[in-house]
Image (spheres, rainbow, N blue to C red):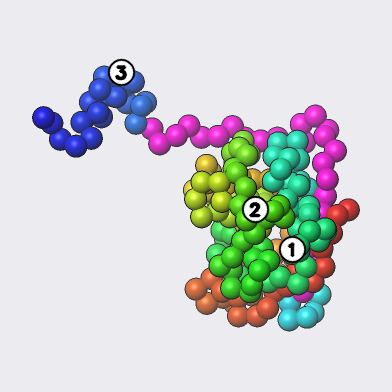
Amino acid sequence: RGAKGRGWYKKFMEEGQDGFQRGVPPTPFDWNAGNILRPKVFFDMSLEQEKIGRIVIELADDIVPKTASNFISLCTGNGKFSYKGTKLHDIIKGKTIRAGDVESETGQYSHSSFETRYFRDENFIIPHSERGLLSMVSSGIHTNGSQFYITLSETSYLNGRGVVFGRVVEGDDVLQAIEKVFTFRGSPARDIVISDCGAL
């Protein structure tokens, strides 16, 4: 009868050792190719009500138009929800900043700018290959809402799990200031707030 998972032998005979690779590394994405003019948004950040600077984000609406549109709407506050006044709720030093809970301050909720809470993964074309990328936080397949990551380094473990939709083009000094805030199990000890946001 054979052991459970016996299909490995057939797979090996048909595809060889390459068939057991976890996945082919994604092709690097060139943000500057084609001189494409992409939309930009901003976050004005505050630490305990003291302004620490502005983060400017370029959105890849040519690659992930629906994801970019969702983010723009949450930045401009055109719908029911807005990033304005929300807190950064998780910082993994040297890895990611997590934010975007527009329903509470707990970091447990996420709601898109659309009528539905979640929307589908558009694609995973852009890899998590560098610092300053914006990627959707999800709890599984097709569970994109409002929460997002900002990467603080290459985070390849998120490839195929989070949809990258933008990059920080100004304000790395602000990210550095945020990284320095003391955290306990990822939670910042001080309030880091998106005091204002919008389109540029």
Of circles 3 and 2, the one toward us is 2
Task: Please say whether residue 83 is one of the residues in the magenta stretch.
Answer: no
- N-term-proximal mark, 2 vs 1: 1
Q: CA distance from mark 3 to mark 1?
A: 51 Å
Q: Which residue is mark 1?
A: 81
Residue type marked 1: Phe
Does any portion of residue 105 appear in the rendered image? yes
Neighbour class for label 1 at 10 Å: few (<14), some, many (≥20)? Answer: some
Give the quarter of the figure containing the N terminus.
Answer: top left
> In the orientation shown, which residue stands out farthest toward the front?
115
Of circles 2 and 1, the one toward us is 2
Q: Which residue is mark 2?
A: 116
Q: Which mark is residue 14?
A: 3
Q: Residue at the spot x=78%, y=68% of the render?
A: 84
Compared with 45, 33 (above or below) is above
Determine whether label 2 and label 1 are within 8 Å by CB.
Answer: no
Residue 7: x, y in percent?
25, 28
Residue type marked 3: Glu
- N-term-proximal mark, 3 vs 2: 3
Q: What secondary structure is found at the residue carrying circle 2?
A: loop
Residue 196: x, y in percent?
82, 68
> In the orientation shown, which residue stands out farthest toward the right?
200
Neighbour class for label 2 at 10 Å: few (<14), some, many (≥20)? Answer: few
Q: CA distance from mark 2 to mark 1?
A: 12 Å
- Rendered image quadrant of residue 41: bottom right
Residue 65: x, y in percent?
73, 40
Q: Which residues are magenta?
A: 21-46
Neighbour class for label 3 at 10 Å: few (<14), some, many (≥20)? Answer: few
- N-term-proximal mark, 3 vs 1: 3
